[in-house]
Image: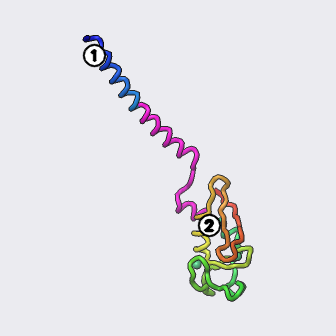
Amino acid sequence: MIDVDVWKGVVFILFGVLVLLAIALMGIAGFSGQRMHFPRPDIKTIKELVKRSIEKQIDLVDVADCPSPERTCAICLEELQGNEHVRQLPCQHCYHEECLVTWGASGYFGVSNTARLACPLCRKDHTIDVEV
Ligand SMILES: [Zn+2]
Ligand SMILES: [Zn+2]
């Protein structure tokens, strides 16, 4: 009778240790898995990278060169002013540089190092390369 109780105790403890180990392993696997499969920089870094790419790959234009009557930035809905940095997508539509950076950062795709800049006005798809 005593032996059976001892065994029950041993099995109980072993089971408990195994459960704890399993939880610890899942935690470690989850943590390293996240780091290995999603090497995504923080949003501030993404914005800086996208800004650099936009400066290189999207034309800086004068507001006068933007197609009227759409001289309003369709991202922030404010009128484009002559003294602002205005970028023109290949579809001719113009946006504030800052707005386009935020827009591009939300369309950043780390696996292929690209950012999607789908035009909010005409829905035309533009993709820029993002150098990391
Ligand atoms: Zn804007
Ligand atoms: Zn457009």
Q: Identify the image's colour scheme: rainbow, by chain, secondary structure or one colour.
A: rainbow
In this view, the residue farthest toward the left is 2
- Please name the predominant secondary structure of the magenta segment in the image: helix
Amino acid marked by disc 2? Gly
At 62% from the left edge and 64% from the top edge, which residue is drawn? 50
Residue behind mark 1: 5
90 w.r.t. 13: above or below: below
At 66% from the left edge and 70% from the top edge, which residue is drawn? 55
Q: Look at the numbered disc 1 and say if its residue's Cβ is closer than 8 Å to ligand 1.
A: no
95 w.r.t. 112: above or below: below
Q: Report the front residue among 96 and 9.
A: 9
Residue 97 percent coordinates (x, y): 61, 75
Q: Report the front residue among 84 and 78.
A: 78
Q: Choose top left, top right, bottom left or bottom right for residue 78.
A: bottom right
At 59% from the left edge and 86% from the top edge, which residue is drawn? 79
Q: Choose top left, top right, bottom left or bottom right for residue 19.
A: top left
Task: Give the distance between the C-alpha atoms of the residues marked 1 and 2, in whole angstroms.
Answer: 66 Å
Q: Quadrant of the C terminus?
A: bottom right
Residue 110 percent coordinates (x, y): 62, 55
Using a 10 Å C-alpha cutoff, classify the residue at mark 2 as few (fewer than 14 neighbours), some (14 to 19) or many (20 or more).
Answer: many
Q: Is residue 18 left or right of residue 114?
A: left
In this view, the residue farthest toward the front is 1
Q: Is residue 33 magenta?
A: yes
Amino acid marked by disc 1? Asp
Residue behind mark 2: 104
Using a 10 Å C-alpha cutoff, classify the residue at mark 1 as few (fewer than 14 neighbours), some (14 to 19) or many (20 or more).
Answer: few
Q: Which residues are magenta?
A: 21-49
Residue 93 badge: none
